Amino acid sequence: MMTKVFIALIALSFAAPVAAETETERAVTSLYERFVAAQNARDTKAVRALMWDSPNFVWISDGKAFWGADRMIERMSAFQRSDVWEVMPDRERARVVEVSPVSAVLFQPLRLTLGSRADPRRIAFLVNLLCVRTVDGWRVGALYTTEENPN
């Protein structure tokens, strides 16, 4: 009996520790889930409400900077006029990096499908969201997007 207990304890000591999700990780993940749901619903008002209301908000897209949340909504709205628009995050590869008590970065690979129903484009993106804690809760403060390089 003692041998079985000893073997079980040794086996448990080699098991990978389960990292507890922090409050910041939960908050940032929740913010992103709402952000994706609003995008997929094409609800630009809900998307806008989740963004930092600051002229310093920036979206880097296609090598260009778009300053201010309203500029991002304007650009996103143009893409969402496509027949197909769907953001599918790869949740297994996502990571939250807490930078400070009021900021964190979410690294989020995803697949964006957009275009015509007959011939939609499927693009693998790497997205980094800078999330900031405001008096109204966590908000998307900056968005950096690039196509994923498979090589």
Image (spheres, rainbow, N blue to C red):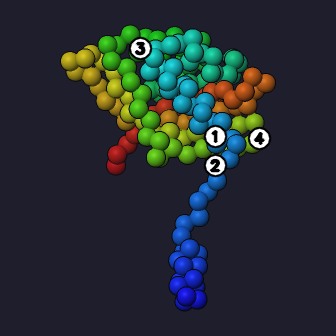
Q: Nearer the viewer, mark 4 or mark 2?
A: 2
Q: Which residue is mark 4?
A: 101
**Secondary structure of residue under mark 4:** loop
Looking at the rendered structure, the kind of residue marked 4 is Pro
Residue 62 is situated, as x and y percent measured from the top left of the image, at 45, 26
**Secondary structure of residue under mark 1:** helix
Q: Which residue is mark 3?
A: 80
Residue at mark 2 to residue at mark 1: CA–CA distance: 7 Å
Crowding around mark 4 (Cα neighbors within 10 Å: few <14, some 14 to 19, many 20+) is few
Q: Earlier in the sequence, mark 1 or mark 4?
A: 1
Crowding around mark 3 (Cα neighbors within 10 Å: few <14, some 14 to 19, many 20+) is some
Q: Earlier in the sequence, mark 3 or mark 1?
A: 1
Tell me what residue is drawn at x 29 percent, y 25 percent: 121
Report if the CB atoms under discs 4 and 3 are less than 8 Å apart: no
Residue 128 is situated, as x and y percent measured from the top left of the image, at 55, 36
Residue at mark 3 to residue at mark 2: CA–CA distance: 33 Å
Crowding around mark 1 (Cα neighbors within 10 Å: few <14, some 14 to 19, many 20+) is few
Report if the CB atoms under discs 2 and 1 are less than 8 Å apart: yes
Q: Nearer the viewer, mark 3 or mark 2?
A: 2
Q: Quadrant of the N terminus?
A: bottom right
Report if the CB atoms under discs 1 and 4 are less than 8 Å apart: no
| Residue 24 sits above or below residue 75 on the image | below
Tell me what residue is drawn at x 68 percent, y 47 percent: 22
